[in-house]
Image (cartoon, coloured by chain):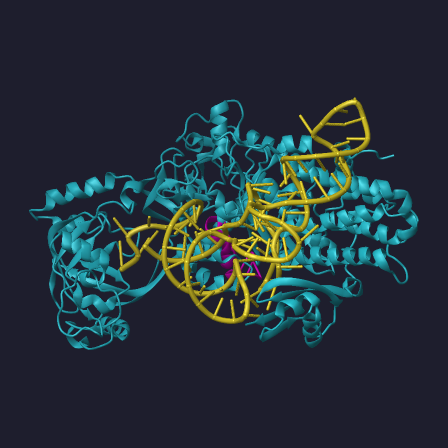
Chain colours: A cyan, B yellow
Amino acid sequence: MKEYYNFKEIEKECQERWEAEDIYSIPDYSDKPKYYCLEMFPYPSGKLHMGHLRNYSIGDVVARFNTMQGYHVIHPMGWDAFGLPAENAAMKHGAESPYQWTWDNINAMRSQLKQMGFSYDWNREVATCHPGYYKWSQWLFLQLYKNGFAYKGKAAVNWCPSCATVLANEQVKEGCCERCDTPVERRDLEQWFLKITDYAERLLNDLDKLTGWPDKVKTMQENWIGRSEGSEIKFEAETGDEITVFTTRPDTVYGVTYMVLAPEHPLVGKLIQDKPEAEKVRAFVEKIRNLSEMARTSGEAEKEGLVTGAYCTNPVNGEKVPVLVANYVLMEYGTGAVMGVPAHDQRDFEFATKYNLSIREVIRPKSQEGDYELKEAYTGEGVMVNSGPFNGVPNQEGISKVIKYLEDNNLGKGHVNYRLRDWLISRQRYWGAPIPIIYCDHCGTVPVPEEDLPVVLPLDVQLEQVGKNPLNSNEDFIYTTCPVCGARARRETDTMDTFVCSSWYYYRYTSPRDEKNAWDQDKAAYWLPVDQYIGGVEHAILHLLYSRFFTKVFYDMGYLKNDEPFMNLLTQGMVLKDGTKMSKSKGNVVSPEDILDRYGADTARMFILFAAPPERDLEWSDRAVEGCHRFLKRIWRLVTSVEESIENAPSSPQGELTGVNKEIHRINHQTRKKVKDDLSQRFNFNTAVSAVMELVNSLNQFKDLPESDRDHAVLREGVETVLLLLAPFAPHITEELWKYIGYDESIHRQPWPDYDQAAIVEEEVTVVVQINGKVREKMLVPVDTSQEALKEKALELPKIKELTEGKNIAKLIAVPKKLVNIVVK
RNA sequence: GCGGGCGUGGCGGAAAGGCAGACGCGCUAGACUUAGGAUCUAGUGGGAUAUCCCGUGUGGGUUCAAAUCCCACCGCCCGCACCA
């Protein structure tokens, strides 16, 4: 009756059935062990792309597999819905508002996700642009503010002229805006920051707890945090001002022959007053400041410096050393001032050579006798020389001794420096969560009272041009009354970085409609941490670091019981076509819609999971997609063609099996084991699928045997195994065929078909016989043949006898169930 | 420059020190078809050919045994990059 695999009809029917029966909605609690399966929620850009399909296909297998394994699985989905593209689209097309554009996209993409058959609990859906959500983004900001983790400060910040907003350090890639690739400029602006640097040490140390994260991601975070141990040392300028430097090599402080300041260093102006060099220095500083961030920080940029005419005093030996400004000293790292020790730092050495600055050796290699000429900086270990009271001290010891000396004499102190900067969260854009702050002429900066949240983002705005935030001209929005004194006051018009909103969404999923809390503490404590997080590696630093920071802050405030959000992380590879990333400009985009239309969701999912292991890049191949579709058709034919024969058979064979029946039964259970191992121990979806393919191939041969030779129950068990093992991968076709072989209840409510240990044991195995490591013969032996017996048997084989005739057997190795290796000379 | 990863048939990939190339794509031949780009069967790393030889980027090493472990080099990809 079911002649062909009509995927369109089947998928539609299944999806309607699941929705009607609400089979994917998950109660808040259960007696079963919990499992939180999370995929990075998408930005609603319009339609799903292949990257989404891959991310969510992987997640769906993980969720469905664990459900079948008996876990109480939460598998939610939502929308990272604030952000620039909505505004840009509104300006481009004129008609639609960001609000309308975003919600249209959400509706379109939600329906695509449903078409893919993903097992989300849609009752838990969240959208960060919904007032019911961003109210709590604002509330969290207020908690940060009240606890001193949010502050407004003036700093040289990254400005993207194209996006017309500032960016966090994490959002700048190679000097360019990570979103639009425009070179970033520096601007001195007053902005809102979150004090992520307070957590630098814990964010670094707790990476050790994340045993389920790829080393790659942990290394990237480690490098980003960039911890350096050393000391701060105070030099005194002629003006009496202190110039503090950070150095990792306090043991070389006696080797300082000059001081370099960043062009932006606040003391530069004061130091050059009255100096003849003043004019030249000002011009130099101006030149550097006008350079783009990219030109300036490029490694190839020539190191340029200029003598200021000023001097400062080395606190340990009282020497006066010249102060320079140079382009290679960065105001944003350390203190913006560097002590020059050319003898022991290669960059200083090159700089000193170029500008004829003196070089003084203060660390001497142990093997070196007497003075010698340095041809390059010596950065290795040695003994301190020319270092006053420290002469003769090994330099490793010298580090702590010098620090102690500095501290005792109030000249400096031990210090740990981080590369990590505070997180800049202000955005001069409209489509984001308003920062809940009011400025009052009398009371200053006043947080919006919690009971007044949310600060609603007005929807009746005109977006005219980039760089013009309509909130700035919206009087209804701007003007309010001061919550403290009641006077007329102004609202902050900057909105929050969207990464703020995405740093806590996985908590909201546990109580998505809670009107009293950002999240219900009991529910969050029950579900969190996330057991498996899946997403692209592009968030290795950004989203994953911010989320860890949020978790730690709110853990410390007592709102959470977990201090890390994600226990296991899987970073999936990109989807490529013709060897490169799919992109409109390259014209190599494969649209999910076409694939769904031509082959259906099950085929798309099968291909994505079969074509490559998840963490590797996946090369899209239309032919291979076709191959997966054929595989599903083969399953369809297998099941529909044996329907009559298995109709009344039990689900597992009864009594003793022999011959081919026993063999198929064994293969069947071996496949169950293989797929379970592939899915639970590592995410080898591709080999799991190929194992099922092999089982299908075996069953296809088996079913063609004369009915008298084969056991119906063995066949039925085989068919059921195929369907159950594939249910997480291809949920529709398996559901339909499950019904077809006589079951009423959904296949997605069935437990995982566990393997029978007794069934997978093979009685005989092929053992390879090697001579000097080369395969010369094979033999079929009972599986439990001992090492000794294997050796004897191997040597008795005629071919082996012949080949070893008259030769001296130097060594004989036998590995049960594998091989015998005969080493002859 | 530093850090990480990856190099296996025509292609995607498999092999968790023990038969290299599972599974799939493609290709070749055949069958069934009005026809097929549907379906089924057989074959498919290279070279000689009924038994071998050679083969996992290159060169060395460890081991009875290496795609797998170690060292050096080459190539590609990713991250960070004047970090004091």
Comparing A144 with A481, the one in front is: A144
Describe residue A744's horizontal placement relative to residue A519 as left or right: right
Answer yes or no: is residue A753 visible.
no
Answer yes or no: is residue A653 visible.
yes
Q: Residue at x 29, y 47 (%)?
A: A299
Bounds of the magenta span? A540-566
Describe residue A675's horizontal placement relative to residue A556 as left or right: right
Most distant residue in the left direction = A276
Quadrant (top left/top right/bottom left/bottom right) for the N terminus of chain A: top right
Q: Residue at x 62, y 70 (%)?
A: A804
Q: Residue A573: within the magenta?
A: no
Q: x%, y% of residue A418?
A: 36, 58
Comparing B1 with A774, the one in front is: A774
Describe residue B32's horizontal placement relative to residue A535 as left or right: right
Comparing A195 with A207, the one in front is: A207
Q: Is residue A645 above or below residue A385?
A: above
Q: x%, y% of residue A425?
A: 43, 45
Quadrant (top left/top right/bottom left/bottom right) for the C terminus of chain A: bottom right
Q: Residue A555: within the magenta?
A: yes
Q: Is residue A269 above or below residue A768?
A: above
Describe residue A264's horizontal placement relative to residue A8 as left or right: left
Q: x%, y% of residue A408?
A: 23, 74
Q: Residue at x 83, y 49 (%)?
A: A702
Q: Residue at x 47, y 44 (%)?
A: A436
Q: x%, y% of residue A254?
A: 17, 68
Q: Quadrant of residue A172?
A: top left
